[in-house]
């Protein structure tokens, strides 16, 4: 059995285990996958928007998932500390058509949604400030909804 087949079977088994957990109550499972090279090129050329074919090697991940979200952090996004957060699939409702730009504070490793208005005094207003100038301010701006990153 090759690697791709074995990984796809593992994904299907994990989904079945999660659905049967606690006598059918279920268990939420999150899995991280790297998009393929062609998917990366398409996303890079499409403003950071990924599509489901970017997971072609592990097609069971696309088939079995209820929700597929992604963070795209190409060279252009890294240069300005603005990864794109998007969704490719949702069985629970509509998928937003475009990814959201976030700001990644390199010091705290926290992300902030730049599309949400800041309400706290001294909070980051919008894209108008450079990430380097705003990094100390952003770390003190909890009203913008930080998303903690897990570094592995």
Image (tube, rainbow, N blue to C red):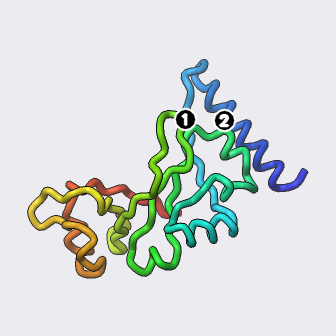
SS under mark 2 = helix
Q: Nearer the viewer, residue 35 or 9?
A: 35
Residue 67, which numbered label?
none
Q: Position of residue 2 (x, y in %)?
A: 88, 54
Q: Residue at x 53, y 36 (%)?
A: 28
Q: Residue furthest left?
A: 121
How packed is label 2: few (under 14 Cα within 10 Å), some, or many (20 or more)?
A: many
Q: Is residue 104 above or below residue 9?
A: below
Q: Is residue 41 above or below residue 64?
A: below
Q: Is residue 138 above or below residue 150?
A: below
Q: Position of residue 25 (x, y in %)?
A: 54, 22
Of pointers 2 and 1, the one earlier in the residue sequence: 2
Instruction: Select label 2 or label 1 by which is in front.
Output: 1
Q: Position of residue 104 (x, y in %)?
A: 37, 68
Left or right relative to 96: residue 65? right
Q: Is residue 130 above or below residue 119?
A: below
Q: Position of residue 16 (x, y in %)?
A: 69, 31
Left or right relative to 67: residue 147? left
SS under mark 1 = loop
Q: Are marks 2 and 1 in contact (CB under 8 Å)?
A: no
Residue, disc 1: 91
Q: Residue at x 21, y 57 (%)?
A: 117
Residue 15, which numbered label?
2
Q: Residue furthest top?
A: 23
Q: Nearer the viewer, residue 150 or 58?
A: 58
How packed is label 1: few (under 14 Cα within 10 Å), some, or many (20 or more)?
A: few
């Amino acid at each position: 059995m090759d690697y791709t087949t074995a990984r796809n079977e593992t994904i299907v088994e994990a989904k079945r285990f999660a659905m049967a957990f606690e006598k059918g109550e279920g268990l939420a499972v999150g899995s991280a996958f790297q998009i393929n090279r062609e998917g990366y090129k398409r996303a890079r050329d499409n403003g950071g928007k990924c599509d489901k074919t970017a997971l072609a090697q592990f097609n069971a991940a696309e088939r079995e998932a209820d929700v597929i979200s992604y963070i795209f952090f190409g060279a252009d996004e890294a240069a300005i500390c603005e990864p794109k957060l998007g969704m490719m699939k949702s069985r629970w409702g509509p998928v937003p058509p475009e990814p959201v730009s976030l700001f990644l504070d390199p010091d705290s490793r926290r992300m902030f949604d730049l599309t949400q208005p800041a309400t706290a005094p001294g909070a980051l207003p919008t894209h108008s400030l450079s990430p380097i100038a705003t990094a100390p301010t952003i770390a003190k701006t909890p009203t913008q909804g930080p998303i903690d990153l897990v570094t592995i």
